[in-house]
Image (spheres, helix red, strand yellow):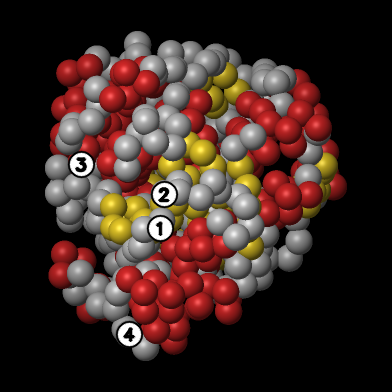
Amino acid sequence: MEYVSTRGSAPVLDFEGATLAGLAADGGLYLPREWPRMTAAEIRELRGLSYAALAARIMQPFVAGSLSEDELGALCEAVYGDFGHAAVTPLVQMDETHWLLELFHGPTLAFKDVALQMLGALFETFLERSDARLTIVGATSGDTGSAAINAVAGRDRAEIFMLHPSGRVSEVQRRQMTTVLAPNVHNIAIDGSFDDAQRHVKRMFADPSINQPLNLGAVNSINWARLMAQVVYYFHSALQLGAPDRPVAYSVPTGNFGDVFAGYVAAQMGLPIERLIVATNVNDILHRALSEGDYSTGETTATITPSMDIQVSSNFERLLFDCGGRDGAAMAVQMAGFDEAHGMQLTNAQREGTAALFTSARADQDDTARALQWAYRNAGQVIDPHTGVGLHASLGALTAGQVVPGTPIVTLATAHPAKFRDAVERAVGVRPALPSRVGDLFGREEHYTELSGDYETSRDFVLQHASASAG
């Protein structure tokens, strides 16, 4: 499988190269040159497979040429055999139409574990193969950081620097990062927003003063391997609900657009997804882009759903590239204009292409609280606020005519409610407890460095503390 950049001028890479590179050299994001397709008969044959076996089948076309079937199968068994639920990503029915897909049974209680545990294993495999080391730089609005740190802590060939916006993640999210005291883990709290942290990370990849002395790698969803692993749970859930003989709709609480783009990939592979509902909080750039064609940034508003407090959704570029005719040169010009003006209008081709599968909805904090209350009253389910944003969109989808009646609607439950226990308790009067497998999170020592919000300070910190070299 060959991988091309959304901006057209970076080298074409294989899966191993794209995984280790993360961001393309031209500032774009890697995508497969073409989507692998599965027939309805081939999808039916997947019924009844374990999650690990299904993952190996779905991911095999994407890793072709870099991992053998046996190598990938062994990685999947090792990664997905260590989750807190035997089904890895179990489905829970809420009523005759609505379902929850629980993605929080990994070690850090968030959907990011499903992908980042695999990414950590891939890094280790490829770095050992080439006798190399990697300096990982990442930005997090909460869950990516803890999942990435858990995946690489203590590994010999990788070192991680994780930037998070100071004071803008929940206490549980922060502690899951800052109480990991492995020598190859560096936590950085910057004075700014997630978007500021994400800009710093992207700029480091384009900055020769840091990317030449250091071999930089990415764990954010700019890394294709993360999205590839997330495609699996769309197949896993849809098969249980009757696919390929019955279409399914999904509502996805969305910040950086990676989780919902994985659903788009599943649809391109042949999975009958009727609709992908992009559910945003009041930081609604994606809702405005999909409903009005206006992809323009604003001020980031802090909410009870901090993982979605994002104004620039990196993976949206992948969708615009694919729906807009895969013209890398045009995409590069469009994104350069966006970077300069902090806004752009989608082209007609992009609007038509996205409208074929996507719709969107916006939830404010009152909407989110009401969704949490609905889940608790009607289904006995305590859900986290991010999942509440998705459920709000699900509940409105039928009345808004976004989904055909009779179609099951699956809301992705992206985090364990205990990660946001204060907001959950305010909404439903129940304070969720952390699972025992997390251990004594609040009794552990924290360690992190607070930095100003300018790029040079973050870059210099990484250069001064990194031990992994390009060799």
Residue at which label 1 appears: 98
Q: CA distance from mark 2 to mark 1?
A: 6 Å
Q: CA distance from mark 3 to mark 4?
A: 30 Å
Q: Earlier in the sequence, mark 1 or mark 3?
A: 3
The local crowd at label 4, few if under 14, some if 14 to 19, many if 20 or more residues have their Cα within 10 Å, is some
Q: Earlier in the sequence, mark 4 or mark 1?
A: 1
Q: Confirm or deny contact between disc 2 and disc 1 (CB under 8 A).
A: yes
Residue at which label 4 appears: 430
Q: Quadrant of the C terminus?
A: top left
Label 1 or label 3, whichever lies nearer to me, is 1
Residue beneath the point at 32% across and 37% down: 242
Image spot of residue 206 (x, y percent): 63, 35
The local crowd at label 2, few if under 14, some if 14 to 19, many if 20 or more residues have their Cα within 10 Å, is many
**379 or 461: nearer the eye?**
379
Amino acid under label 4? Val
Label 4 or label 1, whichever lies nearer to me, is 1
Image spot of residue 342 (x, y percent): 80, 50
Q: Confirm or deny contact between disc 3 and disc 4 (CB under 8 A).
A: no
Q: In this rendering, is residue 65 above or below 162?
A: above
Q: CA distance from mark 1 to mark 3?
A: 26 Å
Q: Earlier in the sequence, mark 2 or mark 4?
A: 2
Amino acid under label 1? His
Label drawn at residue 80 = 3
Q: Earlier in the sequence, mark 2 or mark 3?
A: 3
Does residue 225 appear in this view? no
Residue beneath the point at 44% across and 87% down: 426
Image spot of residue 46 (x, y percent): 25, 27
